[in-house]
């Protein structure tokens, strides 16, 4: 027995990321009495402004966008019953190739040892049993997602801690289904060109390479509501068009690759805490 609660820590790049890939597990494990900790690395200032105004367009104020997104993040955490929210508050780096990548204070420009040292303090404070973040490519190549992976893995090495570590992923079979649903719900959906199609085909993993499949169907409504809490980014959150029932049908299982484990729990597994309880 341990003298502290079992703890899940999710390290994400932006406000709203917590809901998309891990909203189900955060809600499920909170309901099971596990302490949940969310670390959000950036301020989300490269998101949409009021009325959908984009970064670089007249009327887009990154600081105002960041303030608005922080409020939305706090609302999402309430929906998911996240116990602890920690903000690193680096500047949002935008998409790969944007000028914001190299702006002073951007997360992408931050030296990995600096970010890792800050995250290591939180690891020592919370001593998580399970840590979740993105894979080395940030799932789809987003610079802040890549940086979140880098500082997480460096922080774990810095502390010498050995929790179960997972990277978020998606089964390739589900990615094919996404395309079908996008065509169903997105009237302006255009078929990707050959290069885009090749890039999309590389997202996620073949089903047989996924170690962990967690059923979060019971918490699909919470996950949907957490995404909806990020109302300022609604134009970018395709899933909200589906409605809760279809959303839960499509997003009711969250998948991960286990990259570190000392429990010896057999894979494939259906519980991030397999071997710990």
Image (cartoon, rainbow, N blue to C red):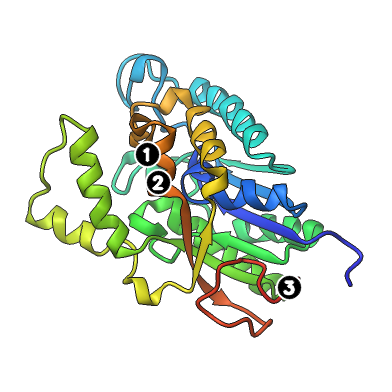
Residue 92, above or below 116? above
* Label 2–label 1 contact, CB within 8 A: yes
Residue found at the far right of this picture: 3
N-term-proximal mark, 3 vs 2:
2
Position of the N terminus by quadrant: bottom right
56 vs 116: above or below = above
- Residue 89 x %, y %: 60, 39
Left or right: 87 in relation to 248: right
Mark drawn on residue 249: 2
Instruction: Identify which residue, 59 or 215, lies in the foreground.
Output: 215
Residue depicted at x 33% and y 56%: 140
User: Would you say residue 186 is visible in this rendering?
Assistant: yes
Mark 3 to mark 1 CA distance (whole Å): 33 Å
Cα distance in 3D space between marks 2 and 1: 5 Å
How far, Cα to Cα, is label 3 from label 2? 29 Å
Q: Which residue is mark 1?
A: 246
Of 44 and 21, nearer the camera is: 21
Which residue is at 92% across, 65% downward? 3
Residue 276 bears which disc, if any?
Answer: 3
């Amino acid at each position: 027995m341990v003298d502290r609660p079992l703890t899940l820590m999710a390290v994400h790049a932006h406000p709203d990321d917590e809901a998309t890939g891990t909203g189900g597990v955060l809600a499920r494990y909170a309901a099971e009495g596990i302490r949940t900790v969310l670390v959000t690395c950036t301020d989300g200032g490269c998101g949409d402004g009021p009325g959908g105004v984009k970064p670089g367009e007249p009327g887009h104020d990154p600081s105002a966008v960041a303030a608005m997104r922080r409020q939305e993040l706090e609302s999402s955490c309430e929906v998911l019953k996240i116990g602890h929210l920690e903000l690193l508050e680096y500047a949002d780096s935008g998409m790969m190739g944007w000028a914001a990548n190299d702006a002073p204070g951007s997360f992408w420009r931050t030296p990995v040892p600096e970010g890792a040292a800050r995250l290591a303090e939180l690891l020592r404070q919370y001593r998580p049993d399970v840590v979740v973040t993105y894979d080395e490519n940030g799932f789809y190549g987003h610079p802040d997602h890549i940086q979140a992976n880098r500082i997480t893995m460096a922080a774990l090495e810095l502390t010498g801690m050995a929790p179960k570590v997972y990277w978020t992923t998606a089964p390739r079979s589900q990615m094919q289904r996404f395309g079908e649903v996008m065509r169903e719900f997105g009237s302006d959906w255009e078929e990707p060109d050959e290069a885009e199609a090749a890039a999309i085909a590389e997202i996620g993993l073949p089903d047989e390479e996924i170690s962990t499949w967690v059923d979060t169907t019971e918490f699909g409504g919470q996950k949907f509501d957490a995404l909806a809490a990020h109302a300022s980014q609604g134009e970018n959150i395709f899933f909200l068009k589906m409605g809760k029932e279809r959303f839960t049908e499509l997003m009711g299982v969250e998948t991960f690759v286990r990259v570190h484990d000392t429990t010896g729990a057999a894979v494939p597994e259906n519980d991030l805490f397999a071997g710990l309880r």
